[in-house]
């Protein structure tokens, strides 16, 4: 990698500016309420967002996107409603575990949950079955509005190809280096993550990247 903290900050912001200029704002997370965002963070695991949208539409149709309803609905019924998201039995179990956590720890109140310090809440979320670092940090950033940088496979792919991280860097190392370098701003972390997903899906693809057309071509 070879960047100083100041050099990394400059590089990261140059990349952000190029992506924003090319794609514009991404309006993430695409959810009307915080509980919808939290549900989406579970449903999007190992599936395309188009499938998640279908599952969310089913939940919305049957008025099941309220936290009280999610708490009361039987797991099997929930699994049926979210079938389009794939691995629906597993995701129903994980979603129920998360909702039960919110009720047992915070009396079902997202206001109380997000009044917790982000460090404490993150550790508690990671203790819930099916909630890993990416899911926990997505909840903290997009629903809790804490300045937490989310790392996913798209982030790692783009950053590796631009020599911003090492191949041996794990989630924590990648996240820490970015958060040390960038201003701790929720809108910046929100938009940056969304733009990295967009460029990875459009140009920086897993198989054969289209570097020639990519707005980040000049940074290679």
Image (cartoon, rainbow, N blue to C red):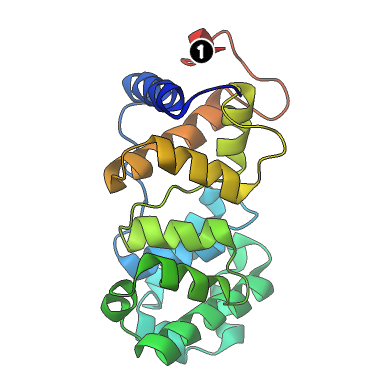
Count of marks, rendered view: 1
Residue 96 against residue 145 in the figure, above or below? below
In which quadrant will I find the N terminus? top right
Q: Nearer the viewer, residue 125 or 120?
A: 120
Percent position of residue 41, x then y: 49, 61
Q: Residue at x 34, y 62 (%)?
A: 143
Relative image position of residue 162 (x, y in whole percent): 58, 21
Vertical placement of residue 2 versus 119, above or below = above
Residue situated in front as seen by the camera: 100 or 119 = 119
Residue 208: tell me if it is visible. yes
Residue 146 drawn above or below residue 217? below
Residue at the image point whose x is 42% and y is 62% from the top: 139
Q: Tell me the quadrant of the picture where the C terminus can be found.
A: top right
Residue 93 at x, y = what percent? Answer: 62, 79
| Visible residue check, residue 58 | no
**Residue at 56% over, 82% down:** 97
User: Quick one: label 1, few (<14), some, or many (20+) residues within 10 Å?
Assistant: few
Residue at the (56%, 54%) spot, across then down: 51
Q: Point out residue 23 in the picture as x, y percentages from the top left corner.
A: 37, 25
In this figure, which residue is indicated by the disc labeled 1? Answer: 219
Q: Is residue 62 left or right of residue 204?
A: left
In the displayed orientation, state which residue is furthest to the front.
4
Name the element at disc 1.
helix
211 left or right, relative to 58:
right
Q: Is residue 64 above or below residue 197?
A: below
């Amino acid at each position: 990698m070879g960047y100083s903290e100041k050099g990394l900050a400059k590089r990261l912001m140059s990349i952000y500016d190029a992506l924003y200029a090319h794609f514009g704002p991404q309006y993430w997370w695409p959810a009307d309420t915080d509980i919808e965002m939290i549900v989406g963070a579970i449903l999007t695991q190992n599936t395309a967002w188009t499938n998640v949208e279908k599952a969310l539409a089913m939940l919305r149709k049957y008025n099941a996107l309220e936290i009280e309803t999610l708490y009361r609905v039987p797991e099997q019924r929930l699994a049926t409603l979210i079938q389009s998201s794939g691995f629906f039995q597993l995701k129903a179990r994980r979603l129920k575990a998360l909702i039960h956590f919110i009720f047992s720890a915070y009396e079902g109140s997202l206001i109380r949950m997000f009044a917790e310090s982000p460090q404490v809440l993150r550790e508690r979320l990671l203790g819930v079955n099916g909630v890993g670092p990416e899911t926990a940090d997505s909840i903290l950033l997009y629903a809790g509005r804490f300045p937490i940088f989310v790392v996913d496979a798209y982030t790692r792919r783009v950053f590796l190809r631009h020599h911003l991280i090492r191949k041996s860097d794990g989630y924590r190392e990648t996240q820490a280096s970015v958060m040390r370098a960038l201003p701790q701003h929720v809108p910046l972390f929100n938009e940056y993550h969304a733009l990295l997903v967009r460029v990875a899906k459009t140009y920086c693809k897993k198989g054969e990247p289209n570097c020639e057309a990519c707005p980040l071509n000049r940074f290679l």
